[in-house]
Image (cartoon, rainbow, N blue to C red):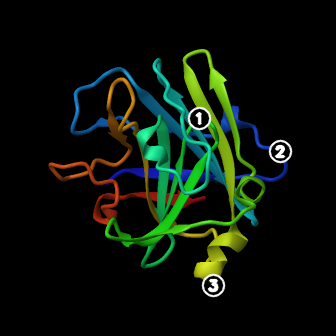
Amino acid sequence: MKEYYITAVNGNIDWAGIPQLEADQIQWKPDCGVRCFAQFCYDEDNLYVHLRAVEKDIRAEYTEPLSSVYEDSCMEFFFMPGNRYFNFEINPNGCLYVGFGHNASDNTALYRSDFSELFDIRSDRTEDGWEVYYRIPLSFIQIFYPAYKFTGTLKANVYKCGDKTACRHYLAWSPILTEKPDFHRTQDFGTMIFK
């Protein structure tokens, strides 16, 4: 099982000093050169996320809340603070889909009109692809898990997909042990450790 240490920060974040993980498990489709990297850090109030894709043919159609962003070029962070997990799925437009549940068939879409501000979403095109930055406030997690704190370990996974991109692809950080695409398998999540 994969492990990643989430760095504690104070004040401004120097992303150059934050360890990077790679979603390097190519699943279900042949390798078409797409790559995905992620960095995480935290303070007492927020978990900060930076996702970066190396991707030539970017698809970015969706802009509306609750859209099927997994059909676009999409990067995803799934994490499990308790007996259910959150799935944060985002495209190059900064269009965010948030779900919460036990598995793919028991997953509820969450929506607030202030998601963009709440999560401080920033997306940019890069020379070789695109990247996004956002934060997940502890106060948001505590709506569902009132006693939760950024300590100990967190079961999680990072994904890259694009169901309707020019080259359909599925990448994962922690390998998914199933023959058909399913990012919602919590038993295949890796471990993130708050240090």
Viewer-nearest residue: 79 or 57: 57
Work out whether 14 lies above or below 112.
above
Comparing labels 3 and 1, the label whose residue is closer to the camera: 1
Describe the element under mark 3 as helix, strand or loop: loop
Viewer-nearest residue: 56 or 78: 56
Task: First in sequence, mark 2 or 3: give its number.
Answer: 2
**View extreme (left): residue:** 179
Q: Residue at x 63, y 21 (%)?
A: 126
**Residue 125 position within the rendered picture, expressed as x and y whole percent measured from the top left:** 64, 24
Q: Amino acid at mark 2?
A: Asn
Mark 2 is surrounded, within 10 Å at the Cα level, by few (under 14), some (14 to 19) or many (20 or more) other residues, namely few
Q: Residue at x 59, y 35 (%)?
A: 92
146 horizontally vs 31: left or right? right
Task: First in sequence, mark 3 or 1: give its number.
Answer: 1
Q: Amino acid at mark 1?
A: Pro
- The residue tagged 3 is 147
Work out whether 40 lies above or below 103.
above
Task: First in sequence, mark 2 or 1: give its number.
Answer: 2
Label 3 to label 1: alpha-carbon separation: 33 Å
Q: Amino acid at mark 3?
A: Ala
**View extreme (right): residue:** 11
Q: Residue at x 33, y 25 (%)?
A: 167
- The residue tagged 2 is 12
**Residue 150 position within the rendered picture, expressed as x and y whole percent measured from the top left:** 63, 68
Comparing labels 2 and 1, the label whose residue is closer to the camera: 1
Describe the element under mark 2 as helix, strand or loop: loop
Label 2 to label 1: alpha-carbon separation: 24 Å
